[in-house]
Amino acid sequence: MTELSYASLRVLVTTDGVAIRVRQRLQPAGGAGDKVFPPTYGTGDRTLKYAVESRRIEGRDVPCVLLDSVASQANRIEEALLDAWEQRVLDFPVIGVDFGKEEQLQDVGVVTTLQAPHRIADAILRDSVDADDQSFRETALGKAYTNATSRNATAVFQLCPTALIFGVWDSTGAKGGMGAKFQRALTSEIVALGASAGKKVSSRIDPLGIQANVPVYHRAEDHSDWTIDASEAEVDKKGKPLPFNRSGGEGKGKASSVNHSNIAPSIDEFAGGVTFDYAVQTVVLSLAALRGLRFVTDLDGVVLTEPTRAQDAARSALAALAIAGIVHQRARGYDLRSRCLLVPDGPLVLEVVRADGRVDEATLTTQEANALVAEAATDAAGAGLAWTREPIRLRPAAKLADLLRRSRELAAGGDEDEAA
Amino acid sequence: MLAIEVELLSGRYAAAAFNDRDRVEWPPHPARLFSALVATWAEHEPSAPGGVEELEVLNRLSELPPPELLVSDGHLAGQRTVTRVFVPVNDESTVSPPNRSALDAAEAEALRATDEKSASRAAQKARSLRKRYQEACLKALAAPTSVGKGDVPLAPRVVFPERRKRQPRTFPVATPEVPRFAFVWRDVEQTRLSIPTLDRLLARLVRLGHSSSHVRARSCDAADLDDLQRRTIRLVPDEESGTIVLRWVAPGQVARLVEAHQRHREVEPRVLPARFVRYARFGTRQAASAIAGFFDPDLVVFSRIGGVRLPITAVAAVARQFRRAMMSSADEPIDPIISGHAADGSPFTAGHLAVVPLSFVGHRHADGTVMGVALVFPQAVSQESRRVVLRAIGRLERAAAASNDPLTSTVRLAMGDAGVLELERVAWGESDRMTLRPATWCGPSTRWVTATPIALDRNPGNLHDADEHRRRAAFEAAEASVRESLRLVLAPDAPDPDEVQVLRSAALTGTTKPQRYPHYPMEPGRTQRVLVHARVRFSTPVRGPLLVGAGRYQGLGLMLPVDGGPMSSPEGEP
């Protein structure tokens, strides 16, 4: 098994490499056979809440459960890339909206294109301004992004290359539905094979030993507060004390409505976790998708002097960045959700798939992946498509900041259900 | 031979059925590959010399007949429970950018101006509009002076991804046993189109279906298909008896797709132009390998064109009225083929005409409405008997014409208090309603499910008995009775079914439980038959129509073939 060098990656991207694929076996951190909890979906009453399917493997029907969807995996790989970027082990363009200088909102920190659900096309960037108080989309860079297409993707490459890896559709920008659409080049999914659904139990013993049937009422002076003293209680039209009830809460008028007393044990068989033979993370990086991107002009609209060299370098840089994402996500670990921690059951193997179906294998450490990205970025810079770590600094528009502050005030006052 | 091989790189195929977003499309429709290739062509310099060559290949491809498919069996394609996933929206903003179309128009005019005077006037206008636009922008971005109730909750939704509103989307997915499939044109010479150009186009194909279904595609020859032929099934076009409907294209498809694209621009929801082709598993089309039934698959079909809409429970009543109408217009003495009785009044055992109302069942939105009536002949019927029936029908139609518009030949059946059912014969080709097409009811198929319940020849006992032993005995007796009834309507050398499951409730959408049906037979004084639904599985395909049980000449015991195809049944409860 060879190390994937930049030179070999470049050859794959520019000639007959169709895809780079990883099929990683995973087991629960608690050991093979331990129970984990998959994501739940609204599948209806009294049916298993997991996404199940039956796969045919070597002549047998094997029941399987989805452990992490394509969208969720994309978010995790973006998080891994963000970590690496913040630690400066990877340098590539990331645009962030900085709340650090906004009064009362400093704790929000910086919201980046790696966290925004729609990446560079996200609403939060639309509601942001640059240092000159110009709205992002009105800046030269913002306009360059709006006008980008797959036939000239320079602006996206230099402002938000991860959007070209995970896909983006500027459906709510100036061009409406005709805004630039870039398909994803990277998909990843984790499925458990040979899965068997289990049961989980829940119950609560109140450490204070409060009885369930202690009556609890709304307090007359403050509807959101409670009291057990009927003389302090808010009364209804007939003059009777009003039983305490939080909207959406259970146990009206009882101690459980204010989170006290016991909860009787119950058994849940519809979301009770699964055990399985093994899980597989299948990652596919489509090099063919990257070859569908073309780069004709630079950010200022000037035609590139060496378009072919630029194009090969840009596509290779995107491939390198995507691979780094895969490697970093693996290094970060597979802590998918509460009670769903998985560990790889074997080393990282990158399968290189060619046009005629031939598959070669390669591997890469985290440091090698970082070096790959750095080398690719240098190559791209030499061809006129340089990467700047922070191409533009944005802050929230005054309107957004103001409304967020107001929202927090309302939540603190208890009038809003949503707390910011 | 020309063949295109497609590998599913992640093993999954994510594409929704064109007529049902909650169901996965499997096997992959050849038309989808064609659309994907046209999109691939259009995205990459279609007017350059290379692009023109590719267009030529696409046009040639659209002229080919529908391909065969080498693909994993649909039952083994691991179809995932279709889940609804909630995707965060992106159309909520606190800042509403002002409209800049007036400014854009003015700037464009300034550039277009031909003489100095109009140029400076246009530039002046653009300047003042720009100033006003910039002021409007600043206002839109600034902290608001007055705040509407809906504005405030917007802010945290914009800033915090986890607070975003979400839209549901469905993602049906199939994971076939073999993550490869091929489209094959066996009788097409490779020279019909340029293979190198086709390969160039296929190499650029990124996905088939949803953007997460990455693929690798290339052309291949017979040797490459060896492995696939061993591990997958072969589907071939079969207009007569195919039950799997796939979409292919017709010549001129590229132009059609380009025109459609102008309209939808990848934004509007769309169903693309296509040609529907029936496919069957290779080998099942050969009539010799399918077991023949007692009844002839060549049906005479009447379509409901108006009048009362009747539920599926009315089938026996409709059949009776239709037969009466025929007997009233038939030659005297009435031929046993129509009446079912020999000259001396005893039941005619050689088989006679079955009058079978056809109801809308098996489909997701099926409601059991009677859509028409089929006249079904026993295979052994003589030509003369057929003529007798057709003469009676003709007279019935003429009688109708005489009293109404002479050009129509509507048969009107009086259904008592319910009203009148208006039927018209489907004389040319086939009805476009699935329920009225002979192939829908004839298969061939290994699995069959009752659309209308079977009237058992013998009383099996109480199927609802509280006592478990007696109830089980009743089910076993019912099953034996169904098996006997099946033997009566299959060729004498036909093997027994592998599995017969008797059900007390309905097993197909649109059908209903046996208790809802009126007594059969309805004439007072006759022994009432027990009605049951059933699911039957044979080891080899059986050709229908399959009419089973004591009520088979009156529309009861009509079974639906359910192997593959768009009308496969959901599970019922016993």
Image (cartoon, rainbow, N blue to C red):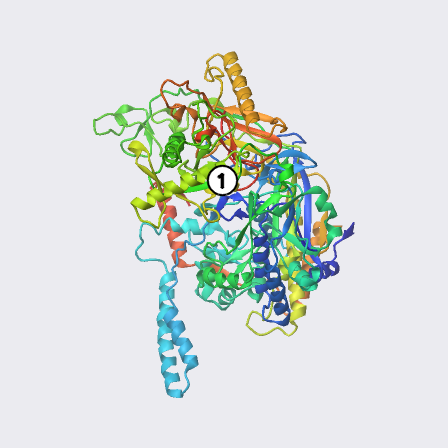
On the question of residue A359 being in view, the answer is no
Q: Nearer the viewer, residue B341 or B486?
A: B341
Q: Report the residue at 57% width, 51% height from top.
A: B209
Q: Identify the element where label 1 is drawn.
A: loop
| x, y percent for residue A177 | 45, 59
Q: Nearer the viewer, residue B311 or B153?
A: B311
Q: Nearer the viewer, residue B256 or B42?
A: B256
Q: Report the residue at 64% width, 56% height from top.
A: A321
Quadrant of the image occupied by residue B327: top left
| x, y percent for residue B524 | 35, 20
Q: Residue furthest bottom?
A: B116
Q: Residue furthest left?
A: A238
- Quadrant of the drawing holding the N terminus of chain B: bottom right
Mark 1 belongs to chain: B
Quadrant of the image occupied by residue A318: bottom right
Quadrant of the image occupied by residue B313: top left
| x, y percent for residue B247 | 55, 51
Left or right: B392, with A361 as reference point = left
